[in-house]
Amino acid sequence: MKHMHWKELLPVDTLQIEACGILHEYDRNVLTLLYQPLIGAGAYSLYMTMWSAHEQQDSLVTKMTHHHLVLMMRWDTKKLLEERRKLEGIGLLKTFLKKGEDPRHFTYELQPPLTPDRFFNDGVLNIYLFNRLGRNRYHDLKNYFSVEKPDLTEYKDMTASFNEVYDSLHPSEMTAGYEEEDVREVASRNDNKGLVFTSSAFDFDVMKQHISDMIVTETMFTDSVKKTIERLAFVYKIEPYEMGRIVEQAAIHHDELSDDLLRKEVSSWFALENRGKVPALQYRRQPAALQEFHTREPVTEEEKAAQRYEQMTPYDILQRAAEGGKPSEADMKLVERIMDEQKLTPGVMNVLLDFIIETQDKKLSKNYVEKFASHWARARVKTVREAMNLALKELQQPKKKPASRGKGSSPTRKDKVPEWISEQKEPDMSHEERSEKQDQLKKMLSKYKK
């Protein structure tokens, strides 16, 4: 979803930093060696800066604002918000906004990192660390590691959940393969603690439609079991219908459901399906390095559209096309397959989807998606602006005029286009220019025919 940072955070907004309990020097070691590989140097630096500010804020004379924090980090507010959300999503920070304050007042509550024992038995974080560092370094670290809460009744909990900020890579996107026993070993424990997941992220109703109530009774779905199912579905990217079969198998084999049984059943299924590959962690949206408007604000309508494509996910595009409803599984699987096969970035996929949906009467034609995706992949399109320029060129290609239908025939319908394209004025071309353009197109296509 689009996050307009100037609406969520301003330099004049004041802040105070609290800590949930006491942060120890030992925690710095855990943060550096276990968390930093997952959240990156920016989020790690922000946590350490907040920690230091928390220790010194009682001696500060002036009231601290986000302007002071931005100066210390040498960032802008957009970068600050982005790195803050990484800390929130992984469970290291809680953000609270005081009601009715102008300028706004935030309380940031630093959360201590998990203990090494809980981290390596978390069932989510340890899997991503294993993928990030590899078997040897992971086991080296595993062997190496063998305050009063403020009153927040006047605040609204603004903390982002883990699965709102991070995503799990599809197995086919990974290059590192591991032995099946590695997958089973690293996913051997799951205590359902530490990370906050959005409760509506998994469709239990669809899952239960694929389960026989003679085998799995409603009483088996305890709160703990439901949380485990949500986490496992997210980490391993399991659709509700597939999870239904896994849950049913677990119940058939053991006549019960428990966190341990589900975890073992899922890890066994995943290891067999994906040849020992371990899920990896990725951030949603277009990668920051490929975002044109990561550090500056858009001015024109075209630039604003480009920023939207950079900040949205393909799921958001499909959901918007469905007018807020849940996209169909067929559409989502098509998008996932195309992105995987053609290696399109999320921002480029957003432009492609929007272009096809708007020009094909809201229909997501498989043939059109495959046609343009393969074309753009061959053109090595990586950025949103490159994709927008290609979409614009497609609309400017000369089209064959339909045969005359005689007097009184209805006028030819003009294709609808995305709003940002309608702002563009198609250049006038002479007959010679159009012919030359067609010849260039034929030459380009002839290369691919060979």
Image (cartoon, grey):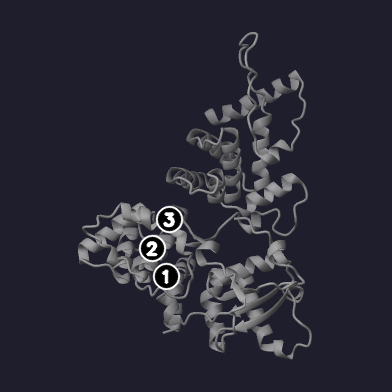
**Is the residue 371 above or below the residue 287 in the image?**
above
Q: Nearer the viewer, mark 2 or mark 3?
A: 3
Quadrant in the picture for residue 106: bottom right
In the displayed structure, does residue 290 sit left or right of residue 13? left
In the displayed structure, does residue 340 sit left or right of residue 69? left
Quadrant in the picture for residue 11: bottom right
Image coordinates of residue 7 in percent, x first then y, are 70, 62
Disc 2 to disc 3: CB gap under 8 Å:
no
The single residue placed furthest to the top in the displayed view is 407
Q: CA distance from mark 2 to mark 3?
A: 12 Å
Which residue type does callout 2 highlight? Tyr
Residue indicated by mark 3: 171
Image coordinates of residue 428 in percent, x first then y, are 77, 26
Give 252 or 268, whichever is nearer the viewer. 252
Image coordinates of residue 101 in percent, x first then y, are 71, 73
Image quadrant for the N terminus? bottom right
Which residue is at 35% across, 59% downward?
270
Which residue type does callout 1 highlight? Arg
Which residue is at 30% across, 58% downward?
246
Which residue is at 48% across, 45% downward?
341
Which residue type does callout 3 highlight? Pro
Residue indicated by mark 2: 178
Of the image marks 1 and 2, the number of the one nearer the N terminus? 1
As helix, strand or loop, the secondary structure at mark 1 comes to helix
Disc 1 to disc 2: CB gap under 8 Å:
yes
As helix, strand or loop, the secondary structure at mark 2 comes to loop
Quadrant in the picture for residue 102: bottom right
Circle number at residue 62: none
As helix, strand or loop, the secondary structure at mark 3 comes to helix
Residue indicated by mark 1: 135
